[in-house]
Amino acid sequence: MGDIAIRPAAADDLAAIVAMLADDPLGAQRESPDDLAPYEKAFARLADDPSQHLVVAVRGDRVVGTLQLTVIPGLSRRGSTRSIIEGVRIHSDERGSGLGTHLIEWAVAESRRQDCQLVQLTSDTTRIDAHRFYERLGFEASHLGFKLSLG
Amino acid sequence: MGDIAIRPAAADDLAAIVAMLADDPLGAQRESPDDLAPYEKAFARLADDPSQHLVVAVRGDRVVGTLQLTVIPGLSRRGSTRSIIEGVRIHSDERGSGLGTHLIEWAVAESRRQDCQLVQLTSDTTRIDAHRFYERLGFEASHLGFKLSLG
């Protein structure tokens, strides 16, 4: 991953991030890349929250990956802090390049740096390739992930 | 649930909360109710974080339930905010009383109040009764939950 840098996302990256969120079998139905207003509002909120780490992977000046890391203190497991990874996307030009591994390894290293004892994420049951990917990286599919839409 | 109140947890509730975390087939191996120091440190961090809502259910002056609700802004799903429920425990004397339903319904209502579009949680694959419980409350087991321990 010689010329890839991972850095905090900036407001200027938003269109590129949203394009990646939408370029996905599930995201295609959920996102509105032609209307950035709701994303701008959410970005401002993320930028204000010290527990939130929205990052981009860039090759040169091109955004080619993103993920959101959230640090969550808690009482269980002897007061363990955990991190949650959400919104992992790799640009279609970069899939299979090892960038996904590089991004997740960054998130795990950052979680250690922030004294997290646990990293967790959920993946839609239909994303079979993603499940194999996370298992290769040492994650265990020990849980079921439940969601309730309030839409 | 006539005489049950749900309120933010206070430092004085900590021993009762930790006792409930430990009184559980999985928690028994993970918690140290005889040493509250790590929990006190985590409690202080939770109390300082406006995205964190650690609550207790009390009957009279007795703590009989707890959960932690975390509010997480994000870009995906058109800038949706989601909430995550963790650390749900019901005192053994109160199991089967409907208190679990009451607590989760509180968390869903609070999530709506905070403009969340999604509520999510993970449950260990071995907690079959919990899975049925969440499905009865309208949650969908649409995801796999992956964890990586950094311990």
Image: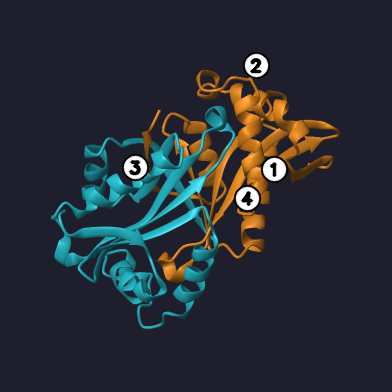
Chain colours: A orange, B cyan
Residue B121's x, y, as percent? 39, 46
Which mark is on residue A141? none
Q: Are marks 4 and 1 on the same chain?
A: yes
Indicate the secondary structure of the residue bearing disc 3. Answer: helix
Q: Which amino acid type is marked by label 2?
A: Asp
Closest to the observer, B11 or B42: B11
- Residue marked by disc 1: A55
B95 relative to A76 in the view: left or right: left
* Quarter of image, res A68: top right
- Residue marked by disc 3: B109
Q: Are there few (<14), some (14-19), or many (20+) residues within 10 Å of tag 1?
A: many
Closest to the observer, B1 or B136: B1
Residue B5's x, y, as percent? 25, 59
C-alpha separation, residue under disc 1 versus residue under disc 2: 22 Å
Indicate the secondary structure of the residue bearing disc 4. Answer: loop
- Residue marked by disc 2: A34
Closest to the observer, B79 or A24: B79
